[in-house]
Image: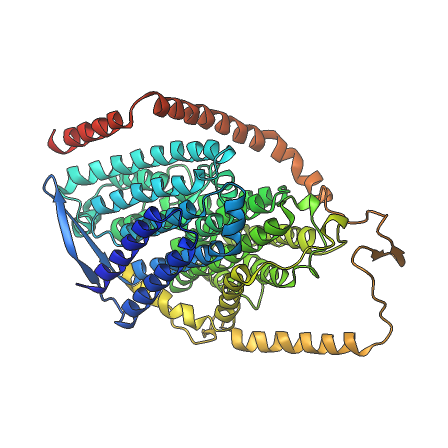
């Protein structure tokens, strides 16, 4: 039995125990222990060496003569590490006080733990796929497991879940069409066979396969214009589930793009194909889709008054940075894109959990009904502060390092417009995350929150561990770049030479150990000057101070409603015009389709669908 077998068996055991023990009050702690065992097993697999080594599963079988097999390389291991780590943080957060409160409100924390465990198993199978057919099976398992996690809250979550499954089904059909073309060309679904025939494919075949797979996998990733399902669906998922989905779920689309389009079809072929009547190659077109996916969702996040939706929209935008870096095809860009997958998962999970902690105490995520919680929930504030610094890409957190690598790559490779687009996205991120922390923790405390206190340790510990990872991997990015380098080798890309503190290059170096030391030295000087004075006057949090005057609690000074009104005045016209009209039209179409899908599902017995699927499969493979 290989280490991969052990990992998958523990994951399957986690699904079985959480499924059978949903009514057990301590099932959350059992799930947390089993996820910890999965993480330790995966880390032990990494100890065996990942300089290009592949670990095969000992099991495999065939479907209609087509072999299915599973194996892990450095890229699979890297994504699996993020998957299990994100699930562990969410499961531990939900295992204690949060789960007890969720149960009292009529929720089923056991079902939540089962849904997270099922998603982990599905993702591990997808990441371990050794051929295109097992990749498609894993892809579908991930899609349906994600749906379960999205709809368990009921109510509006079910509506948004059905919208998601309409998108997911359309994406699956595109992927299936691509597989049919590959089977016709090669007679198999083996990775090696596609890689062998790819250099001989003509332009039409390459374009067709690329667009089909990019459409299918891009839907899961939330790339524009296939993004309208994601923010609402993630926001309505119960808190720890949202943290898991926001951290890694949509990155399964990026993994599939990496394997099929970049590794097997080949990024060089995409660069060679010119788009008629333009100065763009097919690779450039995909990069601009990524750039637009950075900018538009980021500025839509500015308009959100719900903290969960604000973060969910940012999750769409951050995926653009990952893809644009990987499409540059140089060591710095690909390293930045891969590292950003890890970095984003750490601070996004921390941010969603901190928002869940605020909801746990205040019963709201409405940014217009919060404020001043910093002294009541100082640890949750610290987690959010570290998280937004990472999300904004500012030193000393890890998000700065991966964005710096992407920026540097775009500049060196002569892509100034894409660089500007990425920086514009970062500007919007900084503005919106300031709104998030300001309206939640800063400013004037509301009277109804005067007696709020910090959340229990079962919730603070997972948040603080994630925050520590965000800082440590920003201070010493070489820890993550070791894994990233191995993943680059697995993809057939040049490996980034790095140090513990960052990278050294004649065209621009980065040493985060030195940067952080200087930064904290400046903070120390500032703190010394601030606290050495004796002229400060303490103001109670129910009061405030502005413009040289003390404001008492009866004066509502806290500015949160219609935040960034001046900026919205400038960008609101184009948003309310063409873009909002197009967005509402797409939502109407998809809502109609999802309503029809739900009606169809409720009207017919599920066995009929199984029979239809088997019949179509037999026709596809035999006919």
Q: Which of the two residues, 92 or 217, is positioned nearer the viewer here?
A: 92
Return the residue found at the far right.
549
User: Quarter of the image containing the N terminus?
Assistant: bottom left
Q: In the visual, does 566 lie left or right of 480? A: right
Question: Does residue 257 appear in the picture of this structure?
Answer: no
In this picture the colour scheme is rainbow
Return the residue found at the far top.
603
Residue 441's place in the image compared with 304, above or below, is below
Q: Residue at x 28, y 40 (%)?
A: 209
Q: How many numbered marks does the figure carry?
A: 0
Residue 575's place in the image compared with 193, above or below, is above
Q: Quadrant of residue 382?
A: bottom right
Q: In the visual, does 598 lie left or right of 489? A: right
Position in image of residue 249 (x %, y %): 40, 48
Position in image of residue 556 (x %, y %): 82, 47
Position in image of residue 421 (x %, y %): 54, 50
Q: Quadrant of residue 547?
A: bottom right
Return the residue found at the far front.
24
Residue 488's place in the image compared with 617, above or below, is below
Q: Which of the two residues, 21 or 517, is positioned nearer the viewer here?
A: 21
Position in image of residue 362 (x %, y %): 65, 49
Q: In the visual, does 38 lie left or right of 576? A: left
Q: Residue at x 83, y 77 (%)?
A: 533
Question: Does residue 159 appear in the picture of this structure?
Answer: yes
User: Quarter of the image containing the C terminus?
Assistant: top left
């Amino acid at each position: 039995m290989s280490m991969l077998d052990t990992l998958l068996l523990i994951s399957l055991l986690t699904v079985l125990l959480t499924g059978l023990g949903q009514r057990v009050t301590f099932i959350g702690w059992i799930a947390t222990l089993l996820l910890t065992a999965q993480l330790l097993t995966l880390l032990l697999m990494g100890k065996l060496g990942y300089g290009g080594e592949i670990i095969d599963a000992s099991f495999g079988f065939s479907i209609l003569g087509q072999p299915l097999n599973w194996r892990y390389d450095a890229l699979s291991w890297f994504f699996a590490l993020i998957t299990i780590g994100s699930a562990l943080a969410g499961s531990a957060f939900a295992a204690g006080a949060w789960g007890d409160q969720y149960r009292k409100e009529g929720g089923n924390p056991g079902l939540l733990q089962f849904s997270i465990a099922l998603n982990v198993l599905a993702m591990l199978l997808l990441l371990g796929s050794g051929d295109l057919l097992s990749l498609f099976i894993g892809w579908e398992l991930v899609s349906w497991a994600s749906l379960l996690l999205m709809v368990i809250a009921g109510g509006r979550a079910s509506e948004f879940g059905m919208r998601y499954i309409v998108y997911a089904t359309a994406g699956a059909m595109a992927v299936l069409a691509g597989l049919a073309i590959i089977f016709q060309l090669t007679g198999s679904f083996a990775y090696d066979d596609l890689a062998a025939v790819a250099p001989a494919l003509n332009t039409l075949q390459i374009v067709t396969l690329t667009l089909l797979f990019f459409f299918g996998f891009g839907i899961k990733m939330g790339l524009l214009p296939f993004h309208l399902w994601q923010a609402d669906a993630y926001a309505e998922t119960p808190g720890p589930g949202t943290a898991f989905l926001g951290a890694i779920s949509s990155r399964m689309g990026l993994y599939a793009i990496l394997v099929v389009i970049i590794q097997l079809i080949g990024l060089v072929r995409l660069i060679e194909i010119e788009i008629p009547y333009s100065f763009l190659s097919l690779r450039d077109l995909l990069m601009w889709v990524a750039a637009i996916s950075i900018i538009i969702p980021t500025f839509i996040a500015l308009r959100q008054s719900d903290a969960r939706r604000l973060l969910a929209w940012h999750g769409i935008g951050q995926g653009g940075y990952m893809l644009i870096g990987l499409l540059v095809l140089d060591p710095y860009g690909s390293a930045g894109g891969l590292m950003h997958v890890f970095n984003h998962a750490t601070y996004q999970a921390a941010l969603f959990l901190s928002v869940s902690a605020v909801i746990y105490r205040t019963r709201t995520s409405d940014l217009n009904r919060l404020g001043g919680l910093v002294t009541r929930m100082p640890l949750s504030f610290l987690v959010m502060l570290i998280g937004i610094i990472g999300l904004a890409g500012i030193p000393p957190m890890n998000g700065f390092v991966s964005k710096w690598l992407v920026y540097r790559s775009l500049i060196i490779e002569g892509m100034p417009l894409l660089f500007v687009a990425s920086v514009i996205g970062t500007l919007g991120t900084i503005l919106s995350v300031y709104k998030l922390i300001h309206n939640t923790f800063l400013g004037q405390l509301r009277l109804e929150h005067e007696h709020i206190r910090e959340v229990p340790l079962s919730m603070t510990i997972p948040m603080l561990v994630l925050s520590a990872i965000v800082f440590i991997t920003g201070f010493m990015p070489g820890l993550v770049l070791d894994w990233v380098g191995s993943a680059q080798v697995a993809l057939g890309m040049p490996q980034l030479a790095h140090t513990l503190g960052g990278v050294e290059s004649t065209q621009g170096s980065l040493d985060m150990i030195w940067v952080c030391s200087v930064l904290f030295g400046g903070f120390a000087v500032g703190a010394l000057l601030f606290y050495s004075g004796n002229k400060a006057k303490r103001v109670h949090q129910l009061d405030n101070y502005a413009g040289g005057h003390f404001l008492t609690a009866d004066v509502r000074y806290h500015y949160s409603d219609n935040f960034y009104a001046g900026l919205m005045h400038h960008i609101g016209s184009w948003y309310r015009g063409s873009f909002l009209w197009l967005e509402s039209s797409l939502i109407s179409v998809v809502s109609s389709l999802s309503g029809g899908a739900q009606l169809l599902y409720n009207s017919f017995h599920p066995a009929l669908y199984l029979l239809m699927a088997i019949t179509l499969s037999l026709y596809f493979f035999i006919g």
